[in-house]
Image: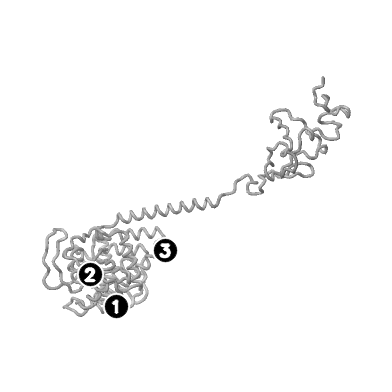
Amino acid sequence: MNEWPEGRTANRGQGNGGRGYGRGSASPEPEGARVMRHVQRGTRPPGPAAPAAPAVPPQGGAVPPRPEYGQYDGYSEGQVYGGGPGSGSGGGSHDGGGRGRGRGTGSGGPGATGKPAPDWRRRLKVGALVLVVVVLVTTIGTYFWADSKLNREVDLSKVIERPDGGEGTNYLIVGSDSREGLSAEDRKRLRTGSAEGKRTDSMMILHVGDNGNTMVSLPRDSDVQIPSFKGSESGKLFPARAGTTKLNAAYAMDGPELLVRTVEHNTGLRIDHYAEIGFGGFASIVDAVGGVEIQIDQRMKDKKSGSDFEPGKHTLNGEQSLAFVRQRYGLAGGDLDRTKNQQKFLAALASQTATPSTVLNPFKLYPTMGAGLDTLIVDKDMGLYDLAEMFWAMKGVTGGDGTSMNMPISGNNGSNLVWDKAKVEQLVKQLNNGEKVTVQGN
């Protein structure tokens, strides 16, 4: 009994009469074309649905041998079995030999190489996020580091009989001759002497307001009255000192609290914050920024301060800078010229410190901040924001953006400088009311 389908014989490879299967078939049409219908990818032509293709034989089973090349020119592995490398949309076209062309993904894109294209947008987002996190962590770390270095030693709540506050914020900035932390060699090199205690070498009121910032230098030889005060350590009340004396005597008597009390009593201006730096810190800041370039207009020589400069442009190191701002002998205007030199130097120091080369360079920024913060003394309520506001306002004023002046002087009382009371009252009124300062100082 013949179990082969009609039109087939069991004798494969027989002649024309046997209609053999596979090789040697005498059929005018290859056997494979009848058994495995060619499936053309693409749009289905109109008409009735095409019959389902025969099931694909298992990969491990017997596969009928392929016809000789030339007997069937429509054969395509990918299109017949549907799982070849060229499958999918645009998975390959037929050439004249019936072989599928194109083994890629069919898109012709970067995937044809076998490697996915890099997602640059995602990489940029991740990189930006990492940068933001690094900057944020560094900023927060720097904030807490700097805040921990502030020496909040001055308690302004101990100051009695204080005047009312006005517009803006008033800072009392003091440069003291404190030798704290200086070795015997440092004292000799910086010519600070070996006197015990500390005195004020420079004093300035910095007013920060909406109508412009103002810096007023207070000569250390200013003729003032020491008012009644509460001892900063003992808490005892002391009566006012008879007569008048130099302003720097207040600091020598009872420190920063009495100095604030004396300035407020003699000006009527309320001091909101206090900042003080000693000799060592001042010199260290200058050295940390690599020196300060300044124009010196006159011959300066003083054995006590150690200054020895010819007219012209100089780059001063810490030791030379301290000598420049401390010199008071040999100057035509005495203490008034000294305060002008101090303001001039602060302008140069601030402008050269607040530059990208310092602020963006951690190898200069941290030594500079460390040098200043180590010896900086402030009041208990002063924060880093207040300190930054003070610095930028001081930089602006000494750089020409604002008013910089000496306290108005009307004459002398021996070696003391007497303030012009009418001008001082007008100046304080303008500052308290937030008005533009029109008073001229000496």
Residue at image point 71% right, 30% down: 57
Q: Measure the alpha-carbon separation of dots 1 and 3.
A: 34 Å
- Of circles 3 and 2, the one toward us is 2
Which residue position holds label 1? 438
* Residue density around tag 2, few if under 14, some if 14–19, many if 20 or more, within 10 Å: many
Residue 336 percent coordinates (x, y): 25, 76
Q: Measure the alpha-carbon separation of dots 3 and 2.
A: 36 Å
Quarter of the picture containing the C terminus is: bottom left
Residue at the far front in the pictured view:
48
Give the structural element (helix, strand or loop) at label 1. loop
As shown in the figure, which amino acid type bears the numbered disc 2?
Answer: Leu
As shown in the figure, which amino acid type bears the numbered disc 3?
Answer: Pro
Residue at image point 24% right, 73% down: 429
Which residue position holds label 2? 269
- Indicate which disc, 1 or 3, sits on the residue closer to the N terminus: 3
- Indicate which disc, 2 or 1, sits on the residue closer to the N terminus: 2
| Residue closer to the observer: 69 or 292 | 69
Instruction: Say whether residue 38 is left or right of residue 161.
Output: right
As shown in the figure, which amino acid type bears the numbered disc 1?
Answer: Thr
* Circles 1, 3 touching at the beta carbon (< 8 Å): no
